[in-house]
Amino acid sequence: MGVLEVIEAIFGDLNLLSHTPVDPFPSAYSLTFDTSNASLNTCQTTASTPAAVKDLCGAEVDLTGNPAIPAYAGHNDNDMLYVGSMAKVFGMYVAFELKSRVEKQAKNMIANGLSTSTAGWENKVYDELKKAWKPKLDAKFPSLPSGMPDFAQILKLSTTGDASFPVQKTAADIDRIGENGTPEGAYGDWMKSMMRWSNNEAAGKCIFPLSYSYINGVLDSAGFFDASAKKGLWVSGDFRGNDWVKGPGNKGGQSLASRFASAQGRTKSNFTGTAFQVARLLTLMAQGKLVDATASNDMINTMSQGILDSSTGKKGTNNFIADALAAASPARPVSQINGKIGLGDDSFAHDCGIIRVDRGSDPSRTMRFVEVILGAAPTNGAGFDQLTVSYYDCITALHP
């Protein structure tokens, strides 16, 4: 190599390092709810009083008309409980957060002179992130095993720096694999199997490569977990037994509210949530503000779908809210639901959804809202259905 080439190589690498690496964690999302809507509060209180529903946890957010500060009402909405497979939504969100941050890093390095003409160029991006991120991930949870996302397994980078989840399979393949089949393809395929079919093996292949340090660091920094109160969204297992802390007792998990610790048969869980924080996550997604508008839309479309557009009449799978509204007397019409159920080894039922109800051809009459219902014991399916329908009716009452 000649002198000029050596100088170019040296100063080229220095240029790549001339920018500040992208931070691993987002800033806390800003979201203000209107909790003063008397009509919604009164309706929600009435709906949550009957014996069959008073012990459930719930939240509803009225997004009709795209308000800047949407009306919110909750019931037992800060109780921590084991939410089962609903936690797969949390993992999906973190993957999209990672994708956005890696893409920004790649584009910054390319703009600063990184050549993409040589095979393996993306490893320079990943190496820079590993060096910059490791101290921050380690400092976030110093008493827990350290981790780092497996960038190369999760993402594919184009020569312009655009990041994507690699996909090899069709929608028909995902449906063929279903809930219990062996996942096929690549990360993007596994995510679809995890979300649409709640395939546990696919969930493990999505969650474990993110690393628990990164997952919970994002959830904490983004404001979905309150580290001081130990409440919110938390994932420290991968649905295949590869827990953050090995051994019995879910030692890497978070403590449950006492009544759920008793009812769900565990004092801690690796998959926890509160109705309030699940509602925040879905509201930001519905507003197009979770990561960004494109990512929010992609996340919505990746979740399981209860009832699709009424023009097709097609009903999807794995949606308790959709089932409850369809079985009500009279049935409550729904145009689309995107959400994720939770059903764990205790058979407690949980569900959340972004719901759209078209009312005629006038788009101004379309209702859009978030429902979250957690903690229905196996013997209380009727209570789950009752609260689901009551929440729907509360929103309808606001928009006659």
Image (tube, rainbow, N blue to C red):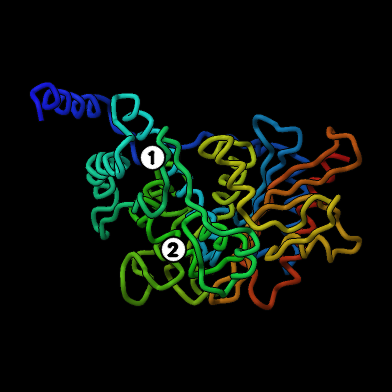
Residue 317 on image: x %, y % = 70, 65
Q: Image quadrant for the N terminus?
A: top left
The residue that appears at 51% across and 53% down in the rendered structure is 167
Residue 118 on image: x %, y % = 29, 39
Q: Could you say which is closer to the camera, residue 80 or residue 103? A: 103
Q: Could you say which is closer to the camera, residue 245 or residue 257? A: 245
Q: Secondary structure at mark 1?
A: helix
Q: Image quadrant for the C terminus?
A: top right
Residue 289 on image: x %, y % = 56, 35
Residue type indicated by callout 1: Val
| Residue at numbered disc 1 | 102
Left or right position of 182 against 62 = left
* Residue 79 in sight in this render: no
> Closer to the N terminus: mark 1 or mark 2?
1
Q: Residue furthest front?
A: 2
Q: Is residue 274 above or below residue 224?
A: below
Residue 25 figure quarter: top left
Left or right position of 235 against 14 = right
Q: CA distance from mark 1 to mark 2?
A: 19 Å
Residue 9 figure quarter: top left
| Residue at numbered disc 2 | 205
Q: Could you say which is closer to the camera, residue 244 or residue 196? A: 196
Q: Is residue 359 above or below residue 184?
A: above
Q: Is residue 223 above or below residue 30?
A: below
Residue 240 on image: x %, y % = 43, 72
Q: Residues within 10 Å of mark 2 (few under 14, many from 20)?
A: many
The residue that appears at 65% across and 55% down in the rendered structure is 339
Q: Which mark is residue 189?
A: none
The residue that appears at 37% across and 58% down in the rendered structure is 209
